[in-house]
Image (cartoon, helix red, strand yellow):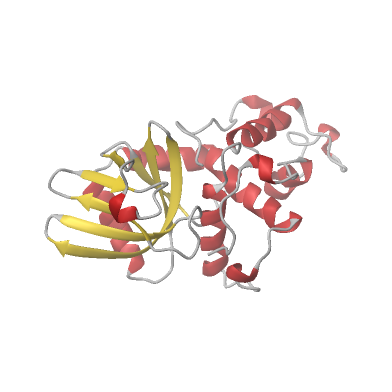
Amino acid sequence: SFSFANFSAKRTTEEFNAEDLVAMFGNGKEVCTGGSEPCNPTPEAAAFARMVNQARASGHCEGLVALAASRFVDKVNPVTGTLQKDADVVHAILRAFATQFLPESKAETDGWAKKSINDILTAISTNLGKDVPEYTLNLYSPNGGHALLPLAIEFPDNDHAVLHVYDSNWPDKDRFVTFDLKKKEWSFSFSGKDPANDPNIWTGGKGDIDIAAVAPVTIVGSPIESGSRAGSAPKTPAS
């Protein structure tokens, strides 16, 4: 996990830009005017970048957890915990954050949102047994969405589960999501210093929780060509 905490867009001067577009999608004519560099983004590409920058106003949790997981899977050095919040690292976080807007990603999370909490926990539990993170976990409340990285799961009894997670808002702290399997509900402390005694705890059920693959999304062509395959914002931007 990163040693520094999640941060709002106002906490950095960096923005998702033309270089990030090229790093993700190449410099084809759908992305760069004339298909050349330095890249002058097409109107569709510029609209995608603008959407990403608007969505990251309150934070970059999706980018932080997705990048931390993918670097662990790929055994990238230096290890994530030693990285500083410099320009290169921030732009890597921005690109990981932007993947949630790709059609492939949105289709995947929409599919998982239709599944039961038991199905989602089964997938997470099975994956955790492999010791290679495959999924990030997304929770949604009236206050917005939040992305987490599952680390370990416990079943105190047949009706309850506790999922320990990497929460970019609380680096190096033990944060967790609790599940009442009988009631088919989850609860999570988003902002409480003591997560076990949070008066403003988030709660939800089916449809308020999904998972997304950590592995890089395979992009077939550009998701912004002619605006026809442009990504759309998640139902609540991750914070």
* 120 left or right, relative to 25: left
Is residue 27 depicted above or below 79 in this figure? above
* 68 left or right, relative to 123: right
Camera sees residue 226: yes
Residue drawn at x 59%, y 50% is 96
Numbered disc total: 0
* 5 left or right, relative to 172: right
Q: Position of residue 226 (x, y in %)?
A: 67, 26
Please name whichever residue, 170 or 126, is drawn nearer the observer in this view of the structure: 170
Q: Position of residue 108 (x, y in %)?
A: 42, 43
Is residue 49 depicted above or below 215 in this figure? above
Camera sees residue 177: no
> Which of the 4 quarters of the picture holds residue 89?
bottom right
Is residue 80 depicted above or below 142 in this figure? below
> Which of the 4 quarters of the picture holds residue 127?
bottom left
Residue drawn at x 45%, y 48% is 147
Q: Position of residue 235 (x, y in %)?
A: 45, 31
Q: Position of residue 58 (x, y in %)?
A: 57, 38
* 33 left or right, relative to 211: right
